[in-house]
Amino acid sequence: MNLKFSKNSTKDIEVLMQIGTSQTPFSYIDMIKSLLAGETLDTEYSEDISGDEKKQIEELIGKIKNIAGIPTTGSLDLFNTGQE
């Protein structure tokens, strides 16, 4: 999966997901599914994304990857309720 970061006309950051040749709006659920399936996550930035913004995005993606590294054997308790 490739995440493409750019800014829109109001300077807000937008993200598109590219899977194969298809581009779709970003979805946390689809990203987590891909990570849990063992897929790699690549990032691509437009020129208008600053170095600080890239750093913040990479830090967030790193945290998400660590969370997705939960062993997939047994049941996953994504909401940490302690119940199966």
Image (cartoon, rainbow, N blue to C red):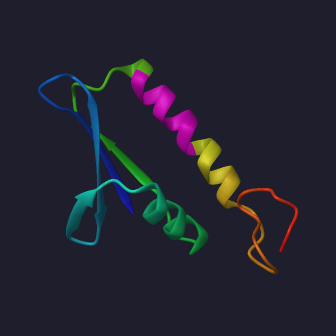
Q: x, y (%) of residue 2?
A: 35, 57
- Residue found farthest to the right: 82
**Where 7 sits versus 44, above or below?**
above
Q: In front here: 77 or 66?
A: 77
Farthest residue to the bottom: give it: 74
Residue depicted at x 24% and y 61%: 24
Residue 58 in the image: state x and y as whole percent. 51, 37
| In the image, farthest residue toward the left | 9
Residue at x-position 80% and y-position 56%: 80
Q: Is residue 56 magenta?
A: yes
Task: Name the spot of residue 53 as percent of width and height, x first.
Answer: 41, 24
Please tell me whether residue 66 is drawn above or below residue 76 in the rendered image.
Answer: above
Coordinates of residue 81 in the picture (x, y in percent):
82, 58
The structure residue drawn at horizontal position 49% and vertical position 69%, both measured from the top left corner, is: 34
| Magenta span: chief secondary structure | helix
Placement of 13 over or under 65, stated as above or below: above
* Count of marks overlaid on the render: 0
Q: As drawn, is 84 to the left or to the right of 8?
A: right
| Residue 32 lies in the magenta stretch | no
Asked which quadrant contains residue 75, the reply is bottom right
Which corner quadrant holds the C terminus? bottom right
Q: Is residue 4 left or right of residue 65?
A: left
Magenta region: 53-61
- Asked if residue 4 lies left or right of residue 58, the reply is left
Quadrant of the snapshot with the N terminus: bottom left
45 sits to left or right of 78 = left
